[in-house]
Image: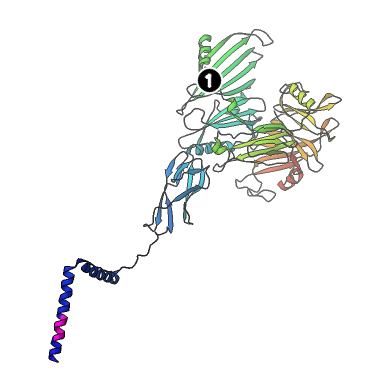
């Protein structure tokens, strides 16, 4: 057994040794062995394939930046997002109102006009977005707003004391707000006209505190009326230096002294805010009793005597190269015939960014219609008020009383012939043309032409009818009062749908008194068809606390009401007069 074991061991050793020698001597065998070993090792150590990961999605987005801009400014907005390791997002930008502020594809915001809007940034292919509210201010328009607030407080018409117990009706003819002198701040031009035909031009500017300050060439309206001028006219001018001038020309004829006095006052308002005043006066004597041909005169500049040549040269130099601003003033009254139209303009100069935002309204659309561009079309005869408002301004930027009249070729032609001409009243007094309107006063289905004349406390109303291809004209109403100012208004008696007139007698006293009655047209004349009414404004109440009709007065005073001389309550007064409604106003 031992022998056999030894033999087997020897054989094994020989075989192993042979194999080792063979491997060492034959490279191909060695390579094959190495390949099998490598394959085995790789099979044991082969790693698993890595899993592909997606970039993180944006969950939140926040837009930040300047949210208050003045018109014309621009700002670039920035964004933050989470998670922070997310790739930079692809954003789209949007403005809720491009007319207020616009935004480009990089988040650059430009302030266009006053107002508020929202700027939105959105992540592409996602619901993630962020909104920033933007407020745009307009410093210039804020100043316009202050002057417009001052203007809106001025009534369309009011009574002004004219000396003693007399009063004169003063009407706001037109106004305009603009930077006329190019100083970066707006100015307000006002044109007012009295019932006597006097024209006043008044300037309002803002002081350093932002309050409106009046600039005019006279101390008070009363001061002008008390001087009993024959005529008085003021005009706005602007020179090459951008100074705004108010030139007032007052003429007074004295038949007894046979003189004509002319006072010219020139008020100069410069862009630096300073105002100066120069006064010129020339007095000429008439050669003839008809007061047509003048002789040599006396001249004064700022109350100092001056030679005629120097006087003329100085007065001429004051207005040399000036341009009148009359056409810049927007009318507060417009007349349009049925089916025709007129375009209204805002009182302040606005560019397209604001003009397209004005909201127009008419208080009586059955009389006139207005479109979104401010074009008013007459529908039927009557009077209405049209206003235009702009978001951001406290008061209406446009306001006008619209008188719509019926068209008649013959009456229109006749009106053109007589318009503006004075007439002589029954008492011999010369009356100035106040205005006209068309109305069916005799209820025959055809409208007549009404011509209105007045001079202080004297009034006259003529009615013109188209008859047999001719104009038939009669004086339907004429009256004179001993004191105060008299005016005529046209109403509709809603109880019978008849057109009536009201003669109003304004008496200037400590409290102010209005006396009036209503008249109906009958057989060519206006006849009184109501009681005599009287309102005493701001009188002290008898019990010192409340009015007789139960209403209280916070100011400690109330209006008193009378019918045919007997005191009545406010409720009774309104019951007696409440069925009369305003028809339309006379058009000058």
Residue 489 quadrant: top right
Residue 79 appears in view = yes
Q: Is residue 11 magenta?
A: yes
Q: Position of residue 128 (x, y in %)?
A: 47, 56
In the image, is residue 451 above or below residue 75? Answer: above
Q: Quadrant of residue 294?
A: top right
Residue in view at x 54 percent, y 17 percent: 280
User: Which region is colored magenta?
Assistant: 7-12
Q: Residue at x 60, y 47 (%)?
A: 554
Residue 557: in magenta span: no
Query: Which quadrant would the C terminus be assigned to in this image?
Result: top right
Residue 142 image position (x, y, % from top left): 50, 39
Judge whether 24 appears above or below 534 on screen. Answer: below
Estimate the x, y position of residue 313 in percent, counting from the top left.
51, 12
Q: Note whether 133 is above or below 29 in the view shown.
A: above
The residue tagged 1 is 322
Q: How is the image coloured?
A: rainbow
- Of residues 441 and 552, the one nearer the viewer is 441
Secondary structure type for disc 1: loop
Total count of labels: 1
Count residues near mark 1 (Cα–Cα under 10 Å), then give few for <14, some for 14-19, many for 20+.
some
Q: Position of residue 573 (x, y in %)?
A: 73, 44
Q: Which residue is outermost to the bottom?
A: 1
Observer-nearest of 227 and 124: 124
Which of the two residues, 35 or 361, is positioned nearer the viewer here?
35
């Amino acid at each position: 057994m031992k022998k056999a074991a030894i033999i087997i061991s020897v054989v094994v050793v020989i075989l192993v040794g042979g194999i080792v020698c063979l491997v060492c001597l034959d490279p191909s065998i060695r390579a094959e062995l190495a390949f099998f070993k490598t394959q085995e090792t790789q099979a044991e150590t082969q790693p698993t394939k890595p899993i592909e990961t997606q970039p993180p999605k944006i969950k939140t987005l926040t837009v930040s930046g300047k949210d208050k801009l003045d018109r014309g400014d621009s700002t670039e907005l920035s964004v933050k997002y989470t998670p922070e390791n997310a790739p930079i997002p692809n954003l789209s930008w949007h403005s809720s109102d491009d007319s207020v502020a616009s935004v480009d594809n990089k988040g650059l915001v430009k302030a266009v006009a006053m107002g508020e809007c929202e700027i939105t940034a959105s992540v592409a292919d996602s619901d993630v977005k962020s909104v920033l509210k933007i407020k745009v201010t307009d410093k210039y328009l804020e100043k316009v707003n202050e002057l417009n607030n001052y203007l809106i407080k001025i009534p369309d018409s009011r009574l002004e004391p004219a000396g003693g117990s007399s009063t004169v009706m003063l009407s706001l003819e037109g106004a305009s707000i603009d930077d006329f002198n190019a100083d970066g701040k707006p100015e307000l031009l006002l044109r007012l006209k009295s019932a006597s035909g006097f024209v006043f031009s008044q300037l309002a500017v803002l002081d350093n505190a932002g309050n409106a300050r009046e600039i005019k060439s006279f101390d008070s309206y009363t001061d002008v009326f008390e001087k009993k001028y024959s005529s008085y006219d003021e005009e706005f001018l602007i020179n090459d230096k951008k100074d705004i001038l108010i030139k007032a020309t007052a003429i007074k004829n004295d038949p007894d002294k046979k003189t004509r006095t002319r006072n010219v006052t020139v008020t100069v308002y410069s862009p630096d805010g300073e105002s100066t005043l120069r006064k010129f006066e020339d007095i000429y004597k008439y050669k003839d009793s008809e007061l047509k041909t003048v002789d040599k005169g006396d001249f004064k500049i700022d109350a100092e005597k001056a030679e005629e040549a120097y006087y003329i040269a100085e007065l001429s130099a004051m207005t040399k190269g000036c341009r009148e601003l009359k056409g810049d003033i927007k009318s507060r009254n417009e007349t349009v015939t049925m089916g025709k139209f007129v375009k209204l303009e805002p009182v302040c100069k606005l560019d397209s960014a604001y003009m397209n935002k004005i909201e127009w309204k008419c208080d009586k659309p059955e009389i006139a219609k207005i479109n979104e561009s401010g074009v008013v079309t007459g529908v039927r005869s009557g009077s209405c008020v049209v206003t235009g408002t702009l978001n951001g301004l406290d008061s209406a930027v446009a306001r006008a009383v619209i008188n719509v009249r019926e068209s008649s070729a013959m009456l229109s032609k006749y009106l053109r012939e007589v318009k503006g001409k004075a007439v002589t009243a029954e008492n011999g007094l010369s009356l100035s043309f106040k205005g006209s309107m068309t109305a069916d006063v005799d209820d025959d289905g055809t409208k007549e032409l009404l011509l209105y004349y007045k001079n202080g406390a004297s009034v006259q109303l003529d009615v013109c009818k188209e008859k047999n291809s001719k104009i038939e004209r009669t004086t339907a109403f004429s009256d004179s009062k001993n004191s105060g100012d008299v005016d005529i208004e046209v109403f509709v008696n809603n109880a019978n749908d008849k057109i009536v007139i009201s003669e109003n007698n304004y008496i200037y006293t400590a409290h102010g008194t209005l006396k009036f009655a209503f008249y109906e047209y009958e057989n060519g004349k206006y006849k009184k068809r109501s009681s005599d009414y009287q309102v005493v404004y701001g009188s002290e109440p008898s019990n010192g606390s409340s009015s007789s009709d139960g209403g209280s007065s916070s100011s400690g005073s109330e209006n008193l009401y009378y019918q045919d001389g007997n005191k009545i309550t406010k409720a009774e007064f309104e019951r007696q007069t409440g069925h009369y409604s305003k028809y339309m106003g006379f058009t000058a």
